[in-house]
Amino acid sequence: MLRMLTRIVVFSAIAMTCGGSRSSAQVVQAPLTDGFVRSSSISVSIDEMLGVEQVRSAEAPLLGPGYPSLWIAEVQFKPLRLLRVNWKEDGEKRQEIVRYLMYRVILRDYTDLAGAEKLELEAKLADTDNRPVNDQKEEFTRPLRLPRFTLEAREIDNSVVGTWSDEIHPGIQQAIFERELGRRGSEVRLLNSVEALQEIGDPVAADDPDTLAKALYGVAIWRNVDDKADFFTVYMAGFSNAYRVSQDEEGNNVFEEKVIVQLFDRPGDEFLQEEIEFRLVKTADVDGDAKSETLPAWVYRRRNFDSSIRDFNQILRRIPTSAIPGETSVAQ
């Protein structure tokens, strides 16, 4: 406990660079080109880097997985767009208006956020004096990137009126590729959310001279979206493995994953829809703290998860079971 408290104190000088203050944070961002207009950059706090290494009380939210398992990517995207498609399905001609979001993703090294203090931060996070050593040969496998895109339609009072998950449709995907990337031919692939399910690879340094050459291009497609909807929220999940565990008022575990959120407005109506009607919202309160964030923003979003695991909190928090009211056994 004393060692961990010491580490947190030592980090305090670096914290302002890594997320403690947005005004002085080092920005890690590839150039916006080829119609890409927004970038999530990366945002990681010292608490997120420490993750489960940091001892926390039973009431405090638990962040994980922490360094070195923690990873995060920069995601750039174009505005929400429309595509009118015509094809034959079951012998009948079909016409449909689909919505899609083009994106490209670049895995980043979040210790680059520390700027000139990068080496010092890496050394403190590694903390070899306090990390267990495994003398057995390990099989090293990389985590998987699992992209998921959710489109929510909202009323002006912010109530949700519809939710759609991105879909896989090779024909629509090919039409989007020809429209967006056809000029580049076989130089680049456009992946759907299943094809983009891959090992994360090596992070790209902030000072890499050819960052975009290492980007992966993808598309999220939504069908049968309500034509009357005017306000949209897009959640982009699977671009970081950061999570947060807390408890609600009933004592149930609440699991949240770190996702990117971007809002769009469409001031038109359901007739003669045009994609130029989609406007990117620049700022909004997306995490319920009554403060507006610059969009896109990284937020924690709740996921359904069965937490019926014996001594779950004690395993992750590394604290005696007896420290939690109502628990009588002791975690081994």
Image (spheres, helix red, strand yellow):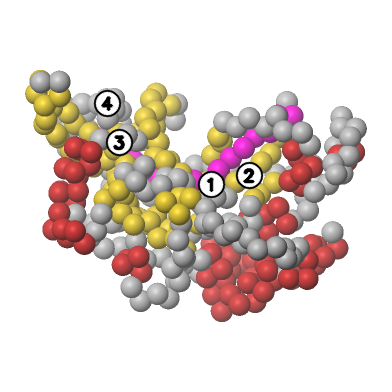
Q: Which part of the image, by quadrant, shows the C terminus?
A: top right
Mark 3 surroundings: few (<14), some (14-19) or many (≥20) residues within 10 A: some
Kind of residue sitting beneath label 4: Asn
Residue at mark 2 to residue at mark 1: CA–CA distance: 8 Å
> Mark 2 sits on what residue?
244
Label 1 or label 4, whichever comes before in sequence order: 4
Label 1 or label 3, whichever comes before in sequence order: 3
> Mark 4 sits on what residue?
224
What is the quadrant of residue 10 in the picture?
bottom right
Q: Which mark is residue 258?
A: 1
Residue 5 part of the magenta segment? no
Q: Main secondary structure of the magenta part?
A: strand
Residue at mark 3 to residue at mark 4: CA–CA distance: 13 Å
Q: Residue at x 72, y 33 (%)?
A: 309
Label 2 or label 3, whichever comes before in sequence order: 3
Check whether the beta carbons of the residues at disc 2 and disc 3 lie within 8 A of each other.
no
Kind of residue sitting beneath label 2: Arg
Which is more toward the observer, 173 or 18?
173
Most distant residue in the front direction: 137
Q: Residue at x 15, y 48 (%)?
A: 179
Residue at mark 1 to residue at mark 3: CA–CA distance: 24 Å
Check whether the beta carbons of the residues at disc 2 and disc 1 lie within 8 A of each other.
yes
Horizontal side of 59 relative to 34 (left or right) equals: right
> Mark 3 sits on what residue?
168
Kind of residue sitting beneath label 1: Lys
What is the quadrant of residue 130 in the picture?
bottom right
Mark 1 surroundings: few (<14), some (14-19) or many (≥20) residues within 10 A: many
Mark 2 surroundings: few (<14), some (14-19) or many (≥20) residues within 10 A: some
Check whether the beta carbons of the residues at disc 3 and disc 4 lie within 8 A of each other.
no
Residue at mark 2 to residue at mark 3: CA–CA distance: 29 Å
